Image (cartoon, rainbow, N blue to C red):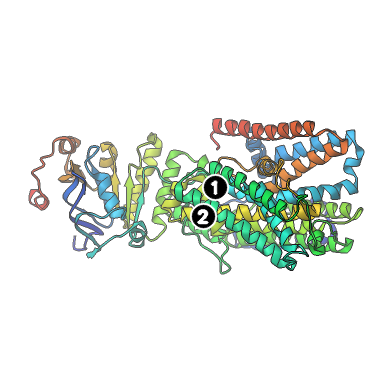
Amino acid sequence: MSDESKEEITTPEEFQEAIAYAASIEQDTADVAGVAIAESPDETMSDVLADWWRRVKVGDLGSLPIIIGLLIIAVIFYTQEPLFFSPRNFVNLLLQMAGIVTIAIGVVFVLLIGEIDLSIGFVSAVAGVGMTLLLRLDGPALPWPIAIGIALLAAIIIGFIQGWIITRTGAHSFVVTLAGLLVWSGVVLIMTTVYSTAGTIVIQDETVIGIANDYLPPLWGWVLWALTTIIYAISRISRYRTQRRQHLSTGPITLLILQILAVSLMTGGAVWYANQDRGVPVVFIIVLFFLLLWTLIADRTRFGRYVYAVGGNQEAARRAGINVNRIRVTVFMITSFMAGVGGIILASRLRSVDTATGGGNLMLNAIAAAVIGGTSLFGGVGFVMSALLGGLIIASVENGMGLLGLPSGVKFVVNGLVLLAAVLIDALSRRRRESSGIV
Amino acid sequence: MADAPILELKGVSKNFGAVQALARVDFETRAGEVMALVGDNGAGKSTLIKGVAGIYPFDEGEIWIDGQQVIIHGPREAADMGIEIVYQDLALADNLDVVNNMFLGRELTSPIRLLDEFKMEQAALETLDSLSVTTIRSVRQQVASLSGGQRQAIAVAKAVMWNSRLVILDEPTAALGVAQTRQVLDLVRRLADRGLGVVIISHNLHDVFEVSDRITVLRLGHKVALLEANKTTQEEVVHAITAGALSFVPGMIEVEE
């Protein structure tokens, strides 16, 4: 394939404009290419493919294992139970993954600085239970924005306290947050049993219940699709344009168009399929919002850059004048905050909280999601979207096994094996990368 | 030699408890020259550059920059005065690419406080280009995938990006192979040719003679010789390093020359 191959692509109408525009950019730069710098040659489509294949061969697999893993999961469950692919189950899957993906976004950050937070499960429960108590009509009966605000503030403060202890004393985050896990599980138990001997408290606010139980009308689903496609296309095209203008090397225009098309088709397909059933869950907008927000912060702000630097080489970060401890404390606050948001989503989905809230394998699933999605446990390597990819895998496996009616014991075993497979693929590809000189 | 030296130390001393790491040492570097700083382990080389870097203050003595006496309170202040130090361990973040490493801690941002990757990439390319660093395939590759010489080049390029006037290199060739050493020494020479003052610390006298204009020899915290590279021999330098008479006191060197 070469650059000319773009003529061969059959493009839907809505993208013809984009192509015409992109072609005009190429024309523009061709005019100045003679005078411009020749030092940064643009990659062609074949360069990109060759480069990608070369990286795969030396073990730099990228998202490939996740895509293959998802395919395997889909095939296995579909052959066992065709309902796995029904629109109804698809919407269920979106609902099931919302909480875990949200918590996993925070986990990505704490893993990026090379630390761990084991308290996230019960911190999410503190937020969920706290909000529920504040909403009680026979209690404080606060309006929902205030109840949610206080619950999230509590989560942020917990993150600050834990982060502060870790950075001030040099104690390992594993131990400090393990203590946090115990403390906050006790607090959840106290909070749920003080107000109700049964230990179950029902959420008494329709808006809060709606967070994880309402659906977008079909039309709004399509508006959401159009918005994501437009935002994605604009960001990619403007990036391409700036690179051209500043004579920096760019990828092939064909790849750019293919990527925009793929994102558009995938989100469009998801919206279409969800609309066959109840529609796109409202909670998915919240998840999407946080995914985009934190991706922007991680990739495009100084803070995000410093998070990666601290995870990659703390000494280098310190010598570069970065306040390493401030970054670390802030990251623990982010992780707790996202756990709090996840806790509210989970509480809303169940419409109530009880003594078991935040327990089970919630924390391990959230950490597993981040790791399966491609964020390294050793710091400095990972991306926010890995929370979505890993969460999708975990939720698919749980969902599929639920459909098959497998007993809990089998579910745990399978979940464990999926995590093991993800970690093994990562470790083996890392070893291969090292032996070939690419780390 | 009408101009004042870029860096001039007058009689600096530093004690760590009972140990005298530096004893009334004079030192200077001029624009456009490579000054080598040699000496055995424990001679006081690192103490001297750390004092200049602002990591700790000298106990006595004066620091003059461009003919003006200054007091350096910390690494940031040293950087603000145009002093950049490339440490032996380079302090690069392996997981970041070349551009991000070169701008670490001093990122350029757009008006809405987002990183301006394009401007940074361009500035990085220009700096590498001006230093004739051509061995790096792409400035968007991770530093982890670079060779030792390439990493050294990035660390040096990072140091000269900020209108620095004095670059101090701590053992820049210690871990490098022959070809890579060649590249780094060429790079050091180009820095001086650009009008910067360069201080190079090295144990490798071959490298020292190849790249430096003058050689300051420290021994046990004393300055025992200041030699011009093209008027001396390796034997003379080795002799100064191992047996330089400690009776030399600062101020006598001019007499000797």
Hey, which quadrant is residue A227 in on the image? bottom right
Which residue in the protein does label 2 denote?
Answer: A327
> What quarter of the picture does the N terminus of chain B occupy?
bottom left
Spatial CA span between label 1 and label 2: 9 Å
Asked whether B26 or B18 is in front, the reply is: B18
Q: Residues within 10 Å of mark 1 (few under 14, many from 20)?
A: many
**Residue at the spot 78% in from the left edge and 56% down from the top edge:** A348
- Residue A113 circle label: 1
Kind of element beneath mark 1 = loop
Which is more N-terminal, label 2 or label 1? 1
Res. B62 in view: yes
In percent of width and height, residue A302 lies at 53, 59
Position of residue A187 relative to residue A151, above or below, is above
The disc label shown at residue B99, or none: none
For this view, does A164 lie left or right of residue B78? right
Marks 1 & 2, CB-CB < 8 Å contact: yes
Q: Residues within 10 Å of mark 2 (few under 14, many from 20)?
A: some
Amino acid, disc 1 = Ile
Q: Please, which chain is the residue tagged with disc 1 on?
A: A
Q: Determine whether, in the image, residue A279 is placed left or right of residue A200.
A: right
Q: Position of residue A80 (x, y in %)?
A: 89, 33
Residue at image position (40%, 38%) is B180
Q: Nearer the viewer, residue B55 or A332?
A: A332
Expressed as whole percent of the image width and height from the top left, the position of residue B132 reads 43, 50
